[in-house]
Image (cartoon, rainbow, N blue to C red):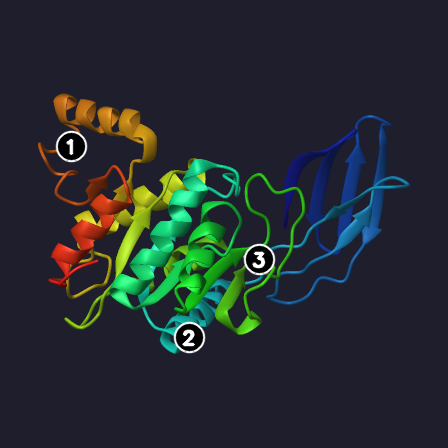
Amino acid sequence: MGFSMTGSFKSHCLVKNFRENSLTIQSFKERRAFSIDIKRPKLRLFSRSFLLCRNESFDFEERTSPGEIREEIQRCYELIHRLGRGVTYLGSSRMGPNHPHYLQSLELGKEIAKLLDCTSWTGAGSGLMDAVTKGALEAGKVVGGFKIAKEAGQWTASNFHAYLPSDTYVTCRFFSARKHGLVDAVVRNNKSDRTAVVALPGGIGTIDEMFEILALIQLKRIGSKLPVPFLVLNYDSFYTKLLDFLDSCEEWGTVSKGEVASLWKICNNNADALSYLTDFYNLTSF
């Protein structure tokens, strides 16, 4: 009894047959087959790399178990427990220090950190994530992060942050673990907790995180006993067309009238965001 799998690897097309204690790899380009004897472990997955040509190899490594993801999520939760919950920022990794949205985000990160006096959480990446990190540090407040080794727009991968202490962030292999961390960091179980989700301008990754958190809030599955403010920073009308699309969804009947507007607050500038948070938490001023 066995199974087959077909795949491609640059100039090779592979057919691998696992039967009993042998593995067959077929190269259609060279019309040659390679047969390898293996010792099959009992009731365990295995990881092997096999040479297909002089300079290339095919890696059969797999995720060994759900336990790896569970352990990574646990590390994120432990970091949150140690540094404290606060504001999660979502935003582009591509908008650098010369972009006007970077400067606005830096100032926002600084002012919110001072206003709410809480930990600032980001994906510990470049771009607008870096901006709010520096802003919160300028305010003298705690910063934590859930880093992915390679962000969009970056040509090099690193498990280490350029300047944050290593005990203030977790480098995640799995996006699911990172998302768990970003969400858990804003959970409010006590009235004294001051948390928020702040969505800055961004691309696919940012929008993915925005709508995942929006759905959790909508379905009351975010895990928070108390409401969590969700702010969308619509700098220079960045998100206006996306908001127009959601209005169209209401017209088509896929979204209830006014439903999305009730779940988040659209802010055109930093003053709007600070004013909203001041009112939300009944603070005196910003």
Q: Earlier in the sequence, mark 3 or mark 2?
A: 3
Q: Specify the quadrant that holds the C terminus.
A: bottom left
Query: In the structure shown, which secondary structural element does the residue marked by tag 3 occupy?
Result: loop
How far apart in space, not on screen, are marks 2 and 1 (Cα)?
37 Å
Q: Which mark is residue 255?
A: 1
> Measured along the vertical axis of the image, is residue 251 above or below residue 52?
above
Circle 1: residue type:
Val
How far apart in space, not on screen, are marks 3 and 2 (Cα)?
23 Å
Measured as percent of width and height from the top left, residue 8 is found at 70, 33
**Residue at 27% over, 40% down:** 269
**Residue at 51% over, 65% down:** 170
Q: Which mark is residue 63?
A: 3
Measured as percent of width and height from the top left, residue 149 is found at 59, 54
> Measured along the vertical axis of the image, is residue 121 above or below residue 166?
above
Q: Which mark is residue 78?
A: 2
The answer to whether residue 183 is seen in the rendering is: no
Query: In the structure shown, which secondary structural element does the residue marked by tag 2 occupy?
Result: helix
> Measured along the vertical axis of the image, is residue 85 above or below residue 182?
below
Count numbered badges in the picture.
3
Measured as percent of width and height from the top left, residue 256 is found at 10, 33
Q: Quadrant of residue 279?
A: bottom left
Q: Quadrant of residue 270?
A: top left
How far apart in space, not on screen, are marks 3 and 1 (Cα)?
37 Å
**Residue at 13% over, 57% down:** 280
Of all residues, the one furthest to the front in this rendering is: 285
Please say if the residues under marks 3 and 1 sit with CB atoms less than 8 Å apart.
no
Left or right side of 208 for 46 = right
Circle 3: residue type:
Arg
**Residue at 18% over, 73% down:** 192
